């Protein structure tokens, strides 16, 4: 346990280095550049010497500015007054607030808003996303047999993958997926011994992922975790009960959400948009190796006429090298599972004959938003595979080092034997 704390502190240091501008300079992880450059009255004022309306911005992803942060502000304000935040009177003629899910009214980590000023609580929750995702991945990787070094490697690869990084400021999607490795850890524990502690932790982790604020990503997480439990020879009905229990615990959020969805005027994405813009085109897969091959919105040189955050698949070039080692070495069952997971995700998020036909149908939880939101499963799977690759690499080097030591020892033996033999022969001749 003490060693785990040390690794947590290490990941805390890595995360702190990533957020050094927030820690040292007090910068808030919030897209305020969009506010002062695109919205009245702020765009008519000069900031930091820039002419009015010319403040640099990435010109994409206004959702945090227009939705997530205002919804969070209103819901926390109402909760502090002892009012259940059911209604938002400030959008249109009024809209549901609790039911829209992304306001994440019941998310347990919201307690920070009651301890800290809102801007600090927001920043801490953004900070927590890679920190907790990394630490939970480390614990899960250790559980399935990876070495400490490989577990740290996998945890950093996932926590700072391109998918996690580009969604950080949303403070919802990352909050959902950070629970994935903890859920898988709970499943592994329950496969060995069924105890109330791990059952409660599994149910709570699943419920927290729903409360975190994005129903589609939570749906992908539920499906992936349940398939994982079955693949690991888990009892179907036992895990089904646990998963349904977590959904029942989340009913306070799910029931209003489903009612809102059933009465919503929002329609599914147009088929042409899914095929031509949302799905990853085969030639865009190069972003798996070079994330900014087509530019980046932050530098306003993104060349593709769609959203950058829908195409992010990279976990880094070095981790991918170790994934390649897994492909050419002997594979254990867990490795095979994550390899298949990578293939299935790529099958569903890229344009190919299968998806060209599949998305002609209106698929619940998929067609309503971007199917590419399940890319976090690809990033997580690749990160775990990279950990296995690191262990393979280290074992191969260890074998090579042992062989070299044995060879050197043998050479020294032969050399000494020749010297001793020559001495014996010389002494016999002299006698």
Image (cartoon, rainbow, N blue to C red):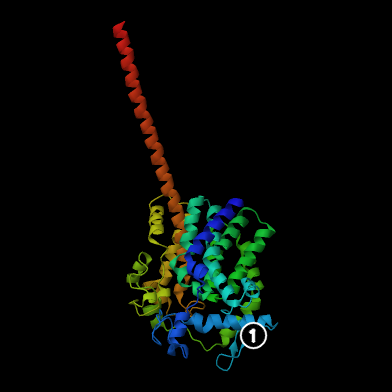
Quarter of the image where one finds residue 124: bottom right
- Which residue occupies the extreme front position in the image? 49
Q: Check the image and report above or below for 41 versus 258.
A: below
- Which residue occupies the extreme right position in the image? 82
Q: Residues within 10 Å of mark 1 (few under 14, many from 20)?
A: some
- Which residue occupies the extreme bottom position in the image? 93
Seen in the image, is 290 located left or right of residue 125?
A: left
Label 1 element class:
loop
Seen in the image, is 209 located left or right of residue 31?
A: right
Seen in the image, is 281 located left or right of residue 204?
A: left
- Residue identifier under label 1: 86
Question: Which one is nearer the viewer's eye here, 319 or 370?
Answer: 319
> Can residue 333 be seen?
no
* Residue 161 percent location from the top left of the image: 45, 65
* Residue 351 percent location from the top left of the image: 37, 73
* Residue 177 percent location from the top left of the image: 53, 68
Q: Residue at x 51, y 77 (%)?
A: 365
* Residue 226 percent location from the top left of the image: 56, 64
Q: Residue at x 29, y 7 (%)?
A: 430
């Amino acid at each position: 346990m003490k060693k785990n704390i040390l690794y947590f502190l290490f990941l805390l240091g890595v995360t702190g280095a990533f957020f050094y501008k927030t820690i040292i300079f007090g910068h808030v992880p919030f897209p305020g550049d969009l506010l002062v450059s695109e919205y009245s009255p702020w765009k008519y004022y000069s900031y930091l010497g820039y002419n009015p309306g010319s403040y640099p911005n990435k010109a994409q992803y206004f959702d945090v500015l227009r939705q997530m942060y205002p919804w969070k502000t209103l819901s926390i304000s109402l909760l502090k007054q002892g009012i259940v935040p059911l209604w938002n009177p400030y959008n249109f003629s009024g809209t549901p607030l609790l039911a829209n899910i992304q306001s994440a009214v019941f998310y347990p980590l919201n307690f920070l808003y009651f301890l800290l000023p809102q801007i600090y609580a927001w920043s801490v929750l953004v900070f927590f996303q890679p920190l907790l995702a990394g630490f939970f991945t480390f614990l899960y990787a250790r559980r399935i047999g990876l070495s400490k070094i490989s577990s740290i490697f996998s945890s950093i690869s996932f926590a700072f993958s391109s998918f996690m990084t580009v969604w950080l400021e949303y403070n919802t999607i990352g909050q959902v997926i950070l629970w994935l490795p903890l859920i898988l850890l709970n499943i592994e524990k329950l496969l060995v011994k069924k105890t109330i502690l791990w059952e409660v932790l599994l149910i709570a982790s699943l419920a927290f992922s729903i409360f975190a604020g994005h129903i589609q990503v939570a749906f992908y997480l539920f499906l992936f975790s349940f398939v994982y439990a079955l693949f690991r020879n888990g009892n179907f009905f036992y895990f089904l009960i646990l998963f349904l229990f977590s959904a029942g615990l989340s009913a306070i959020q799910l029931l209003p959400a489903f009612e809102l969805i059933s009465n919503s005027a929002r329609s599914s994405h147009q088929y042409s948009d899914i095929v031509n813009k949302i799905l990853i085109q085969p030639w865009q897969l190069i972003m798996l190796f070079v994330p900014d091959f087509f530019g980046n919105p932050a530098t306003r040189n993104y060349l593709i006429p769609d959203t950058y955050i829908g195409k992010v698949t990279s976990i880094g070039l070095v981790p991918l090298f170790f994934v390649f080692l897994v492909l050419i070495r002997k594979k254990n069952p867990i490795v095979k599972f994550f390899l298949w997971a990578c293939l299935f995700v790529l099958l569903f998020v890229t344009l190919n004959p299968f998806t060209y036909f599949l998305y002609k149908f209106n698929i619940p939880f998929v067609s309503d938003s971007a199917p590419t939101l399940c890319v976090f499963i690809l990033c997580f799977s690749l990160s775990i595979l990279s950990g296995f690759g690191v262990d393979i690499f280290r074992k191969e080097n260890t074998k090579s080092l042992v062989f070299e030591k044995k060879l050197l020892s043998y050479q020294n033996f032969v050399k000494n034997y020749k010297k001793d033999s020559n001495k014996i022969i010389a002494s016999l001749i002299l006698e």
